[in-house]
Amino acid sequence: MTTHSDFTVTLLPPRNQQAQEPPAHHVGSPPTSFRNPWPSSQPIGFAKVFSTRFLRSADKNNIPVPAGRKGLVNVQKPDWGAASPNKLKATWIGHASFLIETSCVPGQAREVRILFDPVFSERTSPVQWLGPKRYTPTPCSVDELPEVDLIAISHNRYDHCDSWTITEIWRASKARNRTPLIACALGNKAFFTTLLPDLPVENTIELDWWHGIRLDIKAIGSINLICTPAQHTSARSATDKNKALWCSWIVQEPSSENAATISKSLFFAGDTGYRHVNSANPTDKEQESMPHCPVFKEIGDTYGPFDLALLPIGLY
């Protein structure tokens, strides 16, 4: 248990015990890197990634960029769920960025707020003069975000873990005399402690798959946060591929009558694949023969059903 003047963090016992020791997704003991331990995941070389992303081919469904794309997604100013204070709420900020607000029950100052994979930069790149550029503007600025209690990062790639955004959220939070917690998977903690030199050690929570915490925030409320598997990779440079673990997240909202009972639950998939596809346009028969990632059923069987699932279907 970790106790702070504003919050208490308690480790939850894993509900899905790893049968193998070390766990199958660890490379080495202690782990020096991580892997996807399923047949549904196959390595893809740089040449394949480059050709799929940038080159045209006969078996590739090249979807053109639509004209007038700025009007295709109606960007609205968020009200942060003000119209539904007694419900679990999710506000989409763009790409994989979401602000989650729990129900506000009588006696609480406000709801618990969790920010998933926040990215407010124009480009998802180590530099802002080169790299993938945002299609649509964010619906708000960092300074327009409400007070945040927890930042949860699914993995360290630039379109999900943005240094500038995290630094700015930390700055804005300190201006409000708040220090949000940061939750990440194994191998990511050092990145955040280096990025934020004044980040208290107790404010960074590093978890392995199937491990979780109970977070009690003084005068605000409580949540359970569980780190669950995803089929992906990690890297911020050419030399650190898969050195840090990737994950999905579960947020559980305890019942106001009984803290041991879950009233609402949410699944955030982060960035994940479902199966390895050998060609751009496989036939139905070919797809049937391709193994799919087994962990999603396992997550659902262990922690479901979910009231809301936030699943990736493309880049936005």
Image (spheres, rainbow, N blue to C red):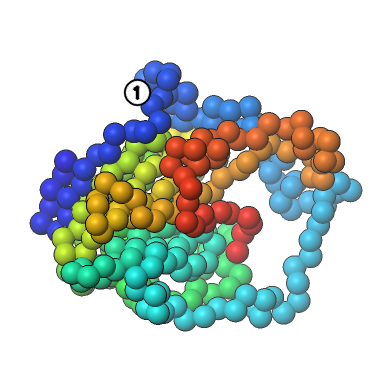
| Image location of residue 25, percent across then percent down | 47, 28
- Residue at position x 34%, y 63% from top? 102
For the question of whether residue 156 can be seen, the reply is no
| Image location of residue 189, percent across then percent down | 31, 43
Q: Which quadrant, please, contains the N terminus?
A: top left
Task: Give, as a three-letter code, the residue at label 1.
Answer: Pro
- Residue at position x 44%, y 34% from top? 243
Give the left or right position of residue 39, taking residue 76 as reference. Answer: right
Q: Which quadrant, please, contains the C terminus?
A: bottom right
Q: Secondary structure at mark 1?
A: loop
Q: Which residue occupies the extreme front position in the image?
A: 257
Is residue 12 positioned above or below 128 on the image? Answer: above
Q: Which residue occupies the extreme right position in the image?
A: 58
Q: Which residue is mark 1?
A: 30
Give the left or right position of residue 193, taking residue 287 as reference. Answer: left
- Residue at position x 16%, y 64% from top? 219
Give the total of numbered labels: 1
Give the left or right position of residue 105, taking residue 30 as reference. Answer: left
Q: Quadrant of residue 74?
A: bottom right
- Residue at position x 17%, y 50% from top? 8
Is residue 64 positioned above or below 190 on the image? Answer: below
For the question of whether residue 60 can be seen, the reply is yes
